[in-house]
Amino acid sequence: MRRSLMSLAAAVTLVAATASPALAGPPWLSIEFPANPMNKSAQGAYLLVHTFHHEQAASFVVEARAEGLVNGQRKTLALTLERTDRDGVYSLRQTWPETGDWVIVITGAPGEGSVTALVSIADGAIRGIRVPTKKIENGRWTVPVQVTQADVETELRSLVALASR
């Protein structure tokens, strides 16, 4: 009996330790721009990505790509995020061209239950940062929504239209 209780406790601990943020509530991320130049582990970063589970900093998988339009040509570039010395903080260096219109797509906890930030950049300057959300439980909670490629395309078209004014 004691052995089976210990096995059960170990199994519960293992499940709790490996649960993704999506299973225990939605993840969140925020963008820090400009990146703090005093933080040695983030020096040279274009921006920082902070990841959270509820109000607590939490490290989880974060992916990024740049979706752009340069001289009328559509571009997609994979981007690399680097961990900093702070839990749940990742740095992103500018590896996309300074010219053109870009939407940087940053997704935390990819898959169902993920959170995505869309960072709009035109002429080398950030024009907006959005984390698409919805209200649930009669407006009690704000949670991230799944972002599709169509959402990214709409964001890029809006940026191009704004930049052409």
Image (cartoon, rainbow, N blue to C red):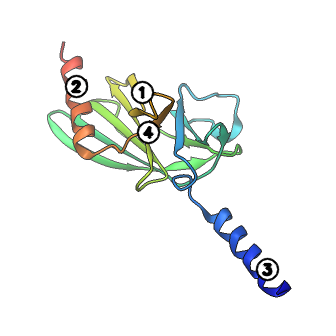
Instruction: Confirm or deny contact between disc 4 and disc 1 (CB under 8 A).
Output: no
Query: Quarter of the image containing the C terminus?
Result: top left
Q: Disc 3 and disc 2: Cα gap in Å?
A: 58 Å
Kindly report which numbered mark, 4 or 1, lies closer to the viewer in this rendering: 4
Where's residue 73, x and y in %? 16, 40
Q: Disc 1 and disc 3: Cα gap in Å?
A: 49 Å
Instruction: Confirm or deny contact between disc 4 and disc 3 (CB under 8 A).
Output: no
Q: Nearer the viewer, residue 2 or 55?
A: 2
Instruction: Please report the residue visible at 49 percent of the width from the left and 52 percent of the height from the top.
Output: 109
Q: Amino acid at mark 4?
A: Pro
Mark 3 residue element: helix
Q: Nearer the viewer, residue 4 or 48?
A: 4
Mark 4 residue element: strand
Where's residue 50, x and y in %? 58, 38
Q: Disc 4 and disc 3: Cα gap in Å?
A: 38 Å
Q: Is 65 drawn above or below residue 157 in the view shown?
A: below
- Asked which quadrant contains residue 132, the reply is top left
